Amino acid sequence: MASYHIFSDSSCDTPIELLNLHHITLIPFYVTFDLERYFKENVEISNEEFYQRLSRDKIFPKTSLPSVMDYCHAFEKEILNGNDILCLCLTQKFSGSYQSAVNARELTLEKYPEADIQVVDSIQATGGQGILLMQAAYLKEAGYSLTDTVKRLEEIKSSARIMFTVDTLEYLAKGGRIGKAASLAGTMLNIKPMIQLRDAELIPYSNVRGRKKSLDRILNMTEEYFNENNAHYEDYDFCLANATTAEDTKAVQSQLENLIGRKITYPMFQIGVTIGTYTGPGAVGVCFVRKFDR
């Protein structure tokens, strides 16, 4: 069985220690604040620098997807190392990154026709994409072939969810990503929108008043999902996504651990440049997906 290397675009927001542990390579998105100079996510601009500029300058940056050649160069390097390719991408509904990777696949196969290059639409983003990426790593490490890994990812990806809150819908609206969540828009002071990312759609859940109530509601949303779907916590993998409020996220994590009856062993997934452009500072979410072996 041929070996394969796992890639993802950088919208998965997977912590560096997990990437290193599982030998995963990220292809960075780009961000610009002035439509002139573009910075590679996690390479030319850090999350800390990004959120500082977002808060200080009160601007709405723009993101740009990885180019076809970005993917081609990365894929070719691993093919020359004797590896096939698995690439997991941000949902097509949010970005053209998936199509860029597909186009790179076709170009690369013209040069290396014996290679096997598989591109998967995660139908997710940030920690939802990242937790699915972890299942890909576990499948590989369990000895699954590239074909069988892709098959299993396609089977479980629809179970992935992010239950989250943002401080404001302003960034989603400015970025044109608000979708069905537009129904949560309001002008009342201190109203916090609650949103679910499901099957590549931002699904409105409710509005609540105040930060603490919004954090508590994330747990209510999670519990309701499992009750409504007759699902079991032990069959799912969980992580926490956070933009700029680590203490709030730690509080949510503690409550989540009480709910599911076990510790979350993953480090926090910090929402990076690509997704942070649309959520803004203050976003917190619970992310989960069915485990690959359940």
Image (spheres, helix red, strand yellow):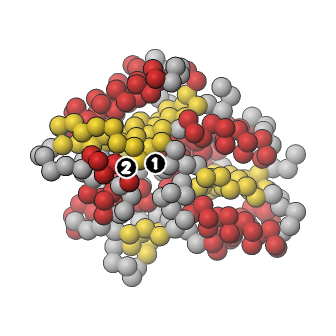
Q: Image point 44% across, 40% down: which residue?
A: 162
Seen from the viewer's position, the closer of residues 73 and 114 is: 114
x then y, percent, for residue 219: 35, 28
Residue at 52 percent of width and 19 percent of height: 230
Please state the total of marks drawn on the protein image. 2
Q: Give coordinates of residue 221: x percent, y percent.
A: 37, 30
Quadrant housing the N terminus: top right
CA distance for labels 2 and 1: 8 Å
Q: Secondary structure at mark 2?
A: helix
Q: Is residue 111 left or right of residue 94?
A: right
- Near mark 1 (Cα within 10 A), the count class, few <14, some 14-19 or many ≥20, is some
Q: Earlier in the sequence, mark 2 or mark 1?
A: 2
Q: Is residue 153 above or below residue 43?
A: above
Question: Residue 218, position in %: x, y?
Answer: 34, 32
Q: Residues within 10 Å of mark 2 (few under 14, many from 20)?
A: few
Task: Write down the quadrant of residue 172 in the picture.
Answer: bottom left
Look at mark 2 in the image and give the residue it sits on.
180
From where the camera sits, is residue 35 visible? yes
**With respect to residue 269, does 34 lie above or below?**
below
For disc 1, the marked residue is: 201
Contact between marks 2 and 1 (CB within 8 A): the answer is: yes
Is 224 displayed left or right of 108 in the figure? left
Callout 1 secondary element: strand
| Outermost residue, left side | 189
Residue type at the position of mark 1: Glu
| Percent of width and height locating residue 173 | 31, 59
Q: Residue 83's image quarter?
A: bottom right
Query: What residue do we see at 34% from left, 73% from top?
Result: 33
Query: Which of the two residues, 153 or 78, is positioned nearer the viewer here?
Result: 153
Disc 2 marks a residue whose amino acid type is Lys
Question: Is residue 97 found left or right of 79 in the rendered image?
Answer: left
